[in-house]
Amino acid sequence: MKRAAIAGFAAGVAMAIGGALGAVSTLGDSHPALAPDAGVMNPMIAGQAMLPGHDLMANLAASPEHTKLAAALRESGLASVLKSNGQFTVFAPIDAAFDVAGAAGDKARLAQRLGYLIVPGAFDSQALLKRISQGGGEARLRTLEGGTLTAKFNGPTNILLMDARGHTADIAIYDVRSRNGIIMVIDRMAAPAGPPRQVALNN
């Protein structure tokens, strides 16, 4: 049963990657595909340079603040998603906040927990602020896991992230650009509520 669950989730992720590749071309100006090294000056994470020409997984693996997330992504099998040619936004909790209690040793469950941190499509801070403004103060983002993360204003320009449990996280570092998406560093773990849902895409 466990192998079947893993295979089912992996198949859903593969479908999401294919859908994301198609979706990125139709997202419009607020979600452009990212051009590697196109004069981009990335913020560093804990003094480590984040290279826009590298994929999401390579930058997360290089970050001193994301050793737990990087290891869990490899264990779950989702590292390959973040090396793909799709476009994704990763809300990446720092090591001090990372918590996947109850999912250790269960690849399917771990993949579902981590899939909740990954949003299909490249959403930088300007794209999120625009969606929040257009959404009357909040933007609901469908995750790879199939759940919803909600981005809200926290002050005039800062963004607060709320998970399905109502728990909130601040975005500590914005717009770490990679070849295939964006990393947003968050200071608390975001987690879904209830059982996993079908993998979904933002339209």
Image (tube, rainbow, N blue to C red):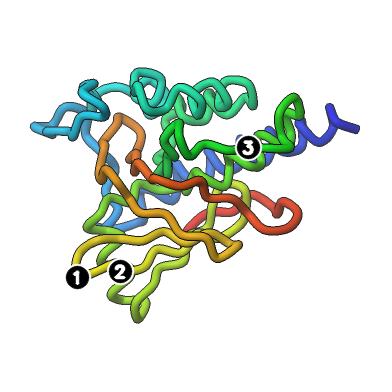
Q: Which residue is mark 2?
A: 153
Q: Which residue is mark 3?
A: 100
Task: Give SS at disc 2.
Answer: strand
Rendered image quadrant of residue 93: top left
Residue at image coords 67%, 58%: 193
The type of residue carrying mark 2 is Phe
Where in the figure is residue 50, as x and y percent of width and height? 24, 25
Task: Give SS at disc 1.
Answer: loop
The type of residue carrying mark 1 is Pro
Q: Which residue is mark 1?
A: 156
Where in the figure is residue 125, as x and y percent of width and height? 25, 54
In the rendered image, the vertical position of residue 138 relative to residue 34, given as above or below: below
Foreground residue, 144 or 112?
A: 112
Where in the figure is residue 58, as x and y percent of width and height? 38, 20
Residue at image coords 19%, 70%: 156
What's the distance in space between the residues labelled 1 and 2, CA to CA? 7 Å
The earlier-in-sequence mark between 3 and 2 is: 3
Contact (CB < 8 A) between labels 1 and 2? yes
In the image, taking residue 96 as reference, residue 160 lies left or right, namely left
